[in-house]
């Protein structure tokens, strides 16, 4: 039998349960909406972060294409990453040439200090805030100092929650007092350390999250790649520009060398210069002295490259200014030495041979300033002799010793006789086994070729040298001058 009087209580209970279920549903719906709003907000944050990252990468790529300067590229990197991870500021420090210091390339305007500050600088900054800014932008940071040095030594990105309490500042002679957190990454490209990238927040801004650190690591990797490639591109451009300048210098130097062989009655003269580099330190010259006499010079400046080429040009100029009107080659060399000596570095000198060819008398008067002995082929005996007049190299002594040691040697050239002047680049050339071309080989080739004439001597010497050295690099400049008396 049903007890109908209980029905109102059951109804009340049922209604109460329904209300509780409805409240629970409303609460669940509200929580779901909150979670949905949070998800959408997080999604919008991620979209914004992704958009900032894409914008950063776009600016970075554009900067590389434009071949930005290091400071410009550093600014784009720091300002871009600051926006991506919402930092207060940041900086890029590059390694100095000696790899012992880090130098600031760019520090953003609101970046907190990232290095320890000496007390005297803090005292100055209390009176003039510009003192602190000037110190931060000019300071050289040792590679083993502070959080920058710690990051470089670690070789991996670092998240420092509290800079002032970091272990790297405990034993420092400078103090760090700011409440700052930082993300740091070493900049490396092709196995080479370039510097350190860092972004920072003050504690009042909130700390960096794990996601911020992950994004920073990715951006730092792209920055390292960009900086490394920009540096390679810039170095390649500088190298091309330097090569262009050297080529221009080489063209100028070519003008200083004889443009052709001189015409001397009763003689044939032939010469050539084969530079090992773009700029040659070797030199040869012909000077019309008048009265049927001709000066013939050959020289080798110690060293190679631009410095040797400049000294060669000076030598040529001085020789041409003092040679006319003088019949003694050793006197001419003495005057050249006195003028060049004050301007020649201690580690440089010039070996030189200067001869005066007398067309009328058929003689060659030769003086050697520390130069290799000339080769003389006698047609009558079909043998090669050495012309060994004594002499000291230019630039070794100021004058007294040079003039006492350096002497003339006069030889009469008979029809068919031939003289070969050369620089030591010919004699000292080596093959693939490091065997030298040598004086004996030179003499043999000269003895075989001299009867054919001066031009044949120069051509054969060059060909024999090419065959001897093969594909190996030319280690030194080679200069040859042959003087033949016609039959």
Image (cartoon, rainbow, N blue to C red):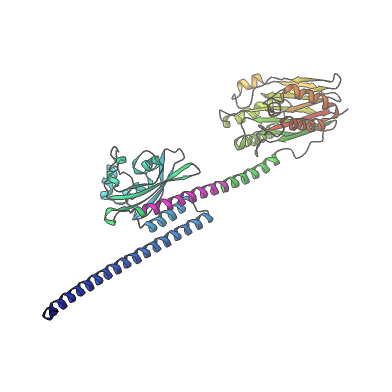
Residue 2 percent across, percent down from the top left: 14, 79
- Residue 295 can be seen in this image: no
Instruction: Name the outermost residue toward the right.
Output: 487
Which secondary structure is most common in the magenta stretch?
helix
**Residue at left offset 26%, top offset 55%:** 204
In the picture, measured across the screen, residue 291 lies left or right of residue 407, that is: right
Please determine whether, in this image, residue 33 is positioned above or below residue 261.
below
Magenta stretch: give its range: 212-236
Write down the quadrant of residue 472 in the picture: top right
Tell me, yes or no, whether the highlighted magenta stretch contains residue 287.
no
Instruction: Name the outermost residue toward the bottom.
Output: 4
How many numbered callouts? 0
Tell me, yes or no, whether the highlighted magenta stretch contains residue 220.
yes
Write down the quadrant of residue 310 in the picture: top right
Please determine whether, in this image, residue 117 is positioned above or below residue 333.
below
In the picture, measured across the screen, residue 361 lies left or right of residue 153, that is: right
In the picture, measured across the screen, residue 209 lies left or right of residue 419, that is: left
Residue 123 percent across, percent down from the top left: 26, 45
**Residue at left offset 30%, top offset 65%:** 35
**Residue at left offset 65%, top offset 19%:** 405
Residue 100 percent across, percent down from the top left: 42, 38
Residue 344 percent across, percent down from the top left: 58, 31
Say which quadrant the N terminus sits in: bottom left
Residue in front for this viewpoint, 276 or 120: 276
In the picture, measured across the screen, residue 252 lies left or right of residue 168, that is: right
Please determine whether, in this image, residue 305 is positioned above or below residue 30.
above
- Residue 125 can be seen in this image: yes
Instruction: Name the outermost residue toward the left.
Output: 5
Write down the quadrant of residue 352 in the picture: top right
Residue in front for this viewpoint, 106 or 210: 210
Say which quadrant the C terminus sits in: top right
Instruction: Name the outermost residue toward the front.
Output: 1
């Amino acid at each position: 039998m049903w007890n109908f009087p209980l029905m109102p209580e059951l109804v009340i209970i049922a209604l109460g349960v329904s209300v509780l279920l409805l409240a629970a549903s409303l609460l669940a719906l509200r929580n779901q909406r909150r979670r949905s709003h949070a998800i959408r907000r997080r999604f919008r944050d991620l979209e914004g972060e992704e958009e900032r990252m894409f914008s950063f990468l776009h600016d970075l790529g554009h900067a590389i294409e434009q071949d930005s300067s290091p400071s410009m590229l550093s600014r784009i990197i720091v300002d871009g990453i600051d926006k991506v991870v919402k930092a207060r500021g940041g900086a890029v420090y590059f390694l100095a040439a000696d790899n012992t210091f880090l130098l600031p390339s760019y520090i953003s305007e609101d970046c907190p200090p990232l290095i320890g500050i000496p007390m005297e600088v803090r005292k100055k900054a209390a009176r003039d805030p510009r003192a602190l800014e000037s110190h931060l932008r000019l300071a050289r940071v040792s590679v083993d100092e502070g959080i920058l040095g710690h990051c470089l030594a670690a070789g991996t990105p670092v998240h420092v929650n509290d800079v002032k309490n970091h272990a790297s500042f405990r034993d420092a002679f400078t103090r760090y007092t700011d409440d700052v957190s930082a993300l740091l990454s070493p900049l490396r490209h092709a196995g080479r350390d370039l510097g350190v990238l860092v972004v920072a927040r003050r504690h009042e801004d909130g700390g960096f999250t794990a996601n911020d650190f992950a994004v920073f690591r990715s951006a730092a990797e792209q920055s390292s790649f960009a900086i490394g490639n920009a540096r390679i591109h810039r170095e390649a451009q500088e190298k091309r520009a330097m090569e262009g300048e050297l080529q221009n210098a080489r063209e100028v130097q070519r003008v200083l060398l004889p443009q052709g062989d001189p015409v001397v009655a009763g003689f044939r003269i032939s010469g050539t210069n084969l530079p090992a580099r773009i700029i040659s330190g070797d030199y040869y010259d012909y000077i019309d002295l008048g009265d049927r006499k001709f000066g013939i010079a050959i020289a080798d400046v110690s060293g190679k490259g631009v410095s040797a080429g400049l000294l060669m040009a000076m030598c040529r100029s001085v020789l041409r200014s003092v040679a006319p009107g003088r019949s003694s080659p050793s006197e001419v060399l003495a005057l050249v030495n006195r003028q060049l000596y004050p301007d020649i570095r201690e580690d440089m000198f010039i070996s030189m041979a200067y001869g005066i060819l007398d067309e009328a008398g058929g003689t060659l008067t030769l003086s050697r300033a520390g130069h290799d002995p000339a080769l003389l082929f006698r047609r009558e005996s079909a043998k090669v002799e050495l012309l060994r007049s004594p002499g000291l190299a230019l630039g070794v002594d100021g004058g007294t010793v040079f003039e006492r040691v350096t002497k003339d040697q006069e030889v009469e050239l008979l029809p068919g006789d031939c003289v070969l002047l050369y620089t030591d680049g010919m004699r000292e050339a080596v093959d693939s086994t490091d065997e030298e071309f040598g004086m004996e080989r030179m003499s043999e080739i000269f003895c075989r070729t001299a009867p054919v004439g001066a031009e044949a001597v120069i051509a054969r010497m060059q060909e024999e040298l090419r065959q001897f050295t093969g594909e190996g690099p030319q280690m030194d400049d080679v200069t040859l001058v042959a003087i033949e008396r016609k039959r």
